[in-house]
Amino acid sequence: MKHCSLLRMEALLNEWLWREEYWLPPGVRWQDIEMKEDEGRFPLPRDLIYTLPLAFAFIALRIVFERLIAVPLSKHFDVKDRIRIQAASIPKLETFYKQNSAQPSQSEVVSLGKQCGLSQRKIQTWFRHRRHQDRPSNTKKFCEAFWRFVFYLVSFTAGLGSLINTPWFWDHRECWRGYPKQPVAEAHYWYYMLEMGFYLSLLLCVSVDIKRKDFKEQVVHHITTIFLIGFSYCANYVRVGTLVMLVHDSSDFLLESAKMLHYAGWTKTCDSLFVIFSLVFLVTRLVVFPCRVVHTTLVVSVEFFQPFFGYYFFNALLLVLQALHIFWANLILRMVYKFVFLGKVERDERSDEESEVDDEEEEPEEEGDECSWEQRKGAINSKLASLANNCVLNNLTNQRNINSRLPKAR
């Protein structure tokens, strides 16, 4: 019975999902692209199954990497974690915070005040401290940036090494010559598997990673990238797919390295890296990607085969990525404009802080608050110390303009 069920499921997949008109140009059949062992590897959809265990392997490796390498390195770089006032232990408020909301409405504040016998101000202060308590530390942000930096750097270096001697790296018409019967080199097979496994691990960890203001765009980016890698592999768009991955990795490791240096307080080096990242990002995402990669998939490819479903679907995913590139380029240009022409940045364009957490500053407490004077003094000192760290990447790490902070710090 089980064998019959599997056969029926396979028949349904062949009938609906693996229909030739979805995956192959008109006039080409599956048997036309079959390869013998001596002809090389042909990409098969079942290969993508291995990316799921790879994703879990990346997650496990990340945990070990952060504990054994990233955390000790953050101490070596003297990464400072901000001192935060700890919220007093009030079980009813803690229960409401975890089960209902981290930002109660005015009516809920009144109700909680009556239940706990506290003033509305003290209730609001408790929730503010509790939200700040859950903010990610600089050490956590450093470790996350370091992990991504290592992967993107290794991926870019290995990808460039495997592609620089290929004919389609220099002449994009070669991406389509002989399509769809194009063998896939072993290096490019692993390039695909590891990239897709890594982005799957990022998607699986999205709930525990630091949430930024562009959180939704990041999720869309990860999902689009996974679909793009998976579909391009199944449709044997591997040649142009490797170029897409290389273009993206070329600037990502620069951003992560700049963020690492910002958390470590290396302001001048951080500024220089951010300028380099901005130039590389704008050139690769707004010039190279649309003018070379998207152009070859939209225009050049139709010289070699007639458009089919895969052609439209693949190009639609590329255009979604390009829309995200324009969104992020706009943020970067606004940051650069404020820094160069105004000499300051009044607010964050893209924050490393959690999007759910408000950006309020700690306020002085009323007399009789549960927090000690030593805690308040430590919080004020930490604010004053953060004022000296006003570099370009303040936009990326949720710090406000110096002038707007001085009155409260005082």
Image (cartoon, rainbow, N blue to C red):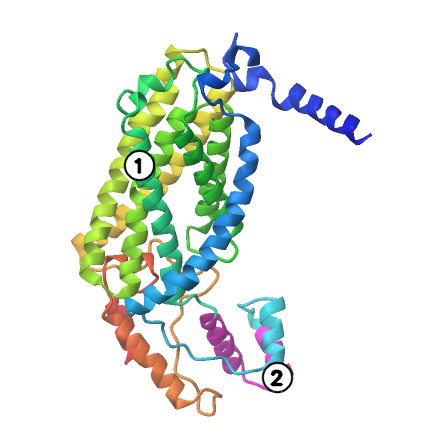
Which residue is outermost to the right? 1
Q: Residue at x 77, y 28 (%)?
A: 3
Q: Which disc, if any, is residue 285?
A: 1
Which residue is outermost to the bottom? 368
Query: Residue 349: percent from the left, percent from the top?
Result: 33, 54
Q: Is residue 256 magenta?
A: no
Residue type at mark 1: give it.
Answer: Arg
Mark in the foreground, 2 or 1:
1
- Give SS at disc 2: helix
Q: Quadrant of the N terminus?
A: top right
Q: Is residue 114 magenta?
A: yes
Magenta part of the chain: 108-133
Count the marks.
2
Q: From the viewer's perspective, is residue 377 above or below residue 312?
A: below
Q: From the viewer's perspective, is residue 143 above or below residue 334?
A: below
Question: Which residue corresponds to mark 2?
Answer: 116
Residue 121 in view (yes/no): yes
Query: Residue 309: percent from the left, percent from the top?
Result: 52, 19
Magenta stretch secondary structure, dominant: helix
- Give SS at disc 1: helix
Mark closest to the chain's N terminus, 2 or 1 = 2
Query: Residue 319: percent from the left, percent from the top?
Result: 41, 31
